[in-house]
Amino acid sequence: MLRAALGIGLAVLAASQVAAVSCADRSHAGNSYTVCEVDPAREDLRLFRAMPDGAPYGNFATLDQALEAEGRHLGFAINGGMYHEDRAPVGHYIEDGREEMRVIATEGPGNFGLLPNGVFCIGDGTARVYETRTYLDRAPACRHATQSGPMLVIGGKLHPEFNPDSSSRFIRNGVGTSAGGDRAVFVISNNAVTFWEFASFFRDVLGLGDALFLDGNVSRLHAPDLARSDLGFPMGPIIAVVEPDP
C-alpha cells in the first residue's frame, strides 16, 4: 500500500513538472503548419530582445546560452514581431514591465500599418491578443507586450482587407488566444500561405476568436520536442517559454 501510494505521488509530481508547451505539425486545406500551444498559467512565457549591454540576442542559440548561465533554458521560442534594421521593435514593446516603445495607433505602410493591428499581452498567468484600439481603451496590465500587424482574426471575424483569392503567399507566423486568456497558440506555416488561409486556420481549425500576425519570411521557431531550431536572419523581439534546467 505504501509503495503504491508513493508511486502515485511520484507520478502526480512528475506530471506536474511536464512542460505545458506542446508542438505538433498539422495540415489544413493543402497547407502545412506547426502549432505550439502554451498554458500561460503554468509556463514562464515572456519576451526577450536585448542583452544587459544592449546588444540584441538576435537568435535562439544566443538567448539559450544566456539562460544557461542562470540554470535555465528555452522550452519554446518564436520571433515576436516586426523590427527595424537595428532590431528595435517597430511598435509597442514591454519587457519585464518596462516599456521600450509606445503604442502606434495610426495607419502606415506595410503589414504593420494595415489596420486593425494588435498587441500580444502577457499578464499574470494570462496571455491575450488585443486589437490596438481595444488595448488602449482597456489598458490591461502586461508584464510583456509586443505590437504587430495586421490582426488576423478580430472577435471571430477575419481582417476585412484579406482576400480569399489573393496570390500573395509567404511563410507566416502568428499567435492566437482564447477569450479568457488561458490559451496561447503559436503557429508557423511550413509552406507559403495567403493571409486569408493563415487567418482561417486560426479561426476555423484552432477555434480562436483573436489572432495576430507576427511576421513573414523572417519567421522562425525553436521547438525542442520537435528537434527543430530554425536559422535565418537576425531577429528582434523573441517570444519564449523559459524552463529551469533539470
Image (tube, helix red, strand yellow):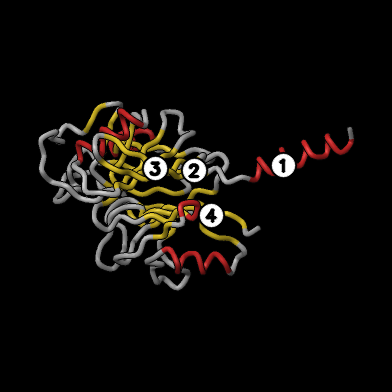
Give whichever of discs 3 and 2 has the lower sequence position. 2
Distance from Cα at disc 2 to Cα at disc 4: 14 Å
Question: Which residue of the protein is positioned furthest toward the right in this rendering?
Answer: 2
Depth check, mark 4 against mark 3: the one in front is: 3
In this rendering, does residue 106 appear at all? yes
Secondary structure under the numbered disc 2 in the rendered image: strand
Q: Give the residue number, with chain letter if any, for mark 4.
A: 242
Quarter where residue 5 is shown: top right
Amino acid residing under circle 2? Ser
> Where residue 218 appears, x then y in whole percent?
27, 58
Depth check, mark 4 against mark 1: the one in front is: 1
- Mark 2 is surrounded, within 10 Å at the Cα level, by few (under 14), some (14 to 19) or many (20 or more) other residues, namely some
Labelled pair 1, 2 in contact (Cβ < 8 Å): no
Q: Give the residue number, with chain letter if any, for mark 1.
A: 13
Give whichever of discs 1 and 2 has the lower sequence position. 1
Q: Considering only vertical position in the picture, is 165 above or below 244?
A: above
Q: Give the residue number, with chain letter if any, for mark 3.
A: 35
Give whichever of discs 3 and 1 has the lower sequence position. 1
Distance from Cα at disc 3 to Cα at disc 2: 8 Å
Distance from Cα at disc 4 to Cα at disc 1: 20 Å
Distance from Cα at disc 1 to Cα at disc 2: 19 Å
Residue under the point 77% across and 36% down:
8
Locate the C terminus and report the quarter of the image it occupies.
bottom right
> Where residue 161 appears, x then y in whole percent?
14, 35
Labelled pair 3, 2 in contact (Cβ < 8 Å): no
